[in-house]
């Protein structure tokens, strides 16, 4: 029986590589097409700058996001190989090549928050390990410093501060901030409303600062097919040989669907009950007030195309 609730889940982390830029709306579709035309493009920064129409630091940032969101993977021969996920979204027969569906943003968020390897520190720590219902920037930064040192890293407070700001900018609008026009452009994940400002309070330095909280409530825009994809993807990565998994692992383990999507336990149990009735997902659900158990009866693999195809069939 697999239970990862109390495990940290990852052994290595990334703190940089995004060049302090959150991902922009047009970047991933552009990057997909560029890699499709020239798999070497991101290993020739001058050519990438011309092809993509962005500066060198943004080219490096985009390469980071392409990898972190699983759209393409770098190879030893200095090329990028497009992934099944990238093709399912952005390909010639892709389901959402211009990022028009909120469901696609949740799918990419899933990869970013759970499947990115090495894990992104801010995502892993704030989504999976932050112990309080709210946080301010100064509280999170102080915790980043303590936690990174505990893990044996020696990053400066500047690096950790920039990494935290990229996380905040990914999910919070920057339009009211004192930044340049280009830096104020909101990225796609702001639409998810996953991170919300709940008020303000004084920091230890005496300055007022925003207080944030994750939106932990049922999210109908996360379809059951998308939830099933995340569950199977998680199971395949962390416990591929295990036939059973505790529901509490799905709910609260680092990198599990419950934590990445910030879904309440009742909603997760309801989804599992619904999904277990459909044999194509390959698992059964045995409810219990104390534990609850999933049993994998068929080795169904996570398939990004199914996130779109099954819903299209139902609504067709």
Image: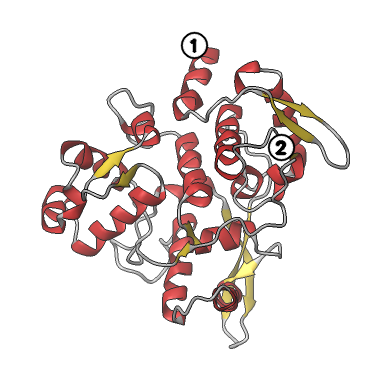
Q: Which quadrant is home to the N terminus?
A: top right
Please indicate whether residue 277 sits to the left or right of residue 38 in the image.
right
Q: Position of residue 278 (x, y in %)?
A: 66, 17
The local crowd at label 2, few if under 14, some if 14 to 19, many if 20 or more residues have their Cα within 10 Å, is many
The part of the image, by quadrant, that contains residue 235 is top right
- From what the image shows, is residue 292 above or below residue 160? above
User: Looking at this view, is 100 or 269 the one in front?
Assistant: 269
Question: Which residue occupies the extreme bottom position in the image?
Answer: 205
User: Looking at this view, is 67 or 296 the one in front?
Assistant: 296
- From what the image shows, is residue 98 above or below residue 238? above
What residue is shown with label 2? Answer: 268
- From what the image shows, is residue 99 above or below residue 63? above
Inter-mark Cα distance, 2 to 1? 26 Å
The part of the image, by quadrant, that contains residue 284 is top right
Q: Can residue 59 be spotted in the picture?
A: yes
Residue, x 70% and y 30% (percent of image)?
A: 271
Q: Where is residue 83 in the image (x, y as percent from the top left)?
A: 35, 36
Please indicate whether residue 223 sits to the left or right of residue 74 in the image.
right
User: Looking at this view, is 190 or 77 the one in front?
Assistant: 77
SS type, badge 2: helix
Q: Where is residue 119 in the image (x, y as percent from the top left)?
A: 49, 57
> Tag count in the figure?
2
- From what the image shows, is residue 142 above or below residue 290? below
What residue is shown with label 1? Answer: 316
Q: Where is residue 283 in the image (x, y as percent from the top left)?
A: 68, 25
Please indicate whether residue 286 sits to the left or right of residue 136 in the image.
right
Q: Earlier in the sequence, mark 2 or mark 1?
A: 2
The local crowd at label 1, few if under 14, some if 14 to 19, many if 20 or more residues have their Cα within 10 Å, is few
Residue, x 63% and y 68% (percent of image)?
A: 135
Please indicate whether residue 94 sits to the left or right of residue 140 in the image.
left
The part of the image, by quadrant, that contains residue 45 is bottom left
């Amino acid at each position: 029986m697999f239970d990862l609730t109390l495990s940290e889940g990852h052994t290595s982390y990334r703190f940089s590589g995004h060049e302090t830029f959150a991902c922009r709306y047009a970047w991933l579709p552009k990057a997909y097409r560029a890699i499709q035309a020239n798999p070497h493009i991101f290993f020739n920064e001058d050519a990438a700058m011309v092809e993509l129409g962005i500066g060198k630091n943004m080219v490096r940032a985009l390469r980071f996001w392409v990898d972190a969101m699983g759209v393409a993977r770098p190879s030893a021969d200095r090329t990028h190989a497009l992934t099944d996920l990238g093709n399912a979204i952005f390909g010639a027969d892709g389901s959402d090549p211009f990022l028009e569906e909120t469901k696609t943003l949740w799918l990419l968020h899933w990869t970013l928050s759970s499947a990115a390897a090495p894990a992104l520190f801010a995502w892993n720590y704030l989504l999976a390990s932050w112990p309080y219902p709210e946080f301010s920037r100064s509280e999170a930064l102080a915790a980043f410093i303590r936690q990174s040192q505990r893990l044996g890293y020696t990053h400066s407070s500047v690096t950790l501060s920039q990494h935290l700001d990229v996380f905040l900018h990914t999910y919070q609008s920057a339009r009211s901030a004192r930044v340049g026009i280009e830096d104020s452009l909101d990225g796609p994940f702001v639409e998810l409303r996953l991170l919300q400002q709940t008020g303000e309070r004084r920091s230890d330095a005496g300055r007022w600062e925003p207080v944030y909280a994750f939106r932990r409530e049922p999210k109908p825009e996360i379809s059951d097919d998308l939830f099933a994809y995340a569950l199977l993807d998680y199971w395949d990565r962390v416990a591929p040989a295990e036939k059973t998994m505790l529901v509490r692992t799905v709910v609260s383990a680092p990198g599990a669907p419950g934590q990445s999507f910030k879904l309440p336990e009742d909603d997760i149990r309801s989804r599992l009950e619904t999904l277990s009735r459909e044999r194509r997902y390959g698992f059964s659900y045995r409810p219990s007030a104390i534990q609850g158990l999933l049993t994998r009866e068929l080795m169904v693999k996570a398939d990004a195309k199914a996130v779109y195809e099954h819903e299209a069939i139902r609504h067709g």
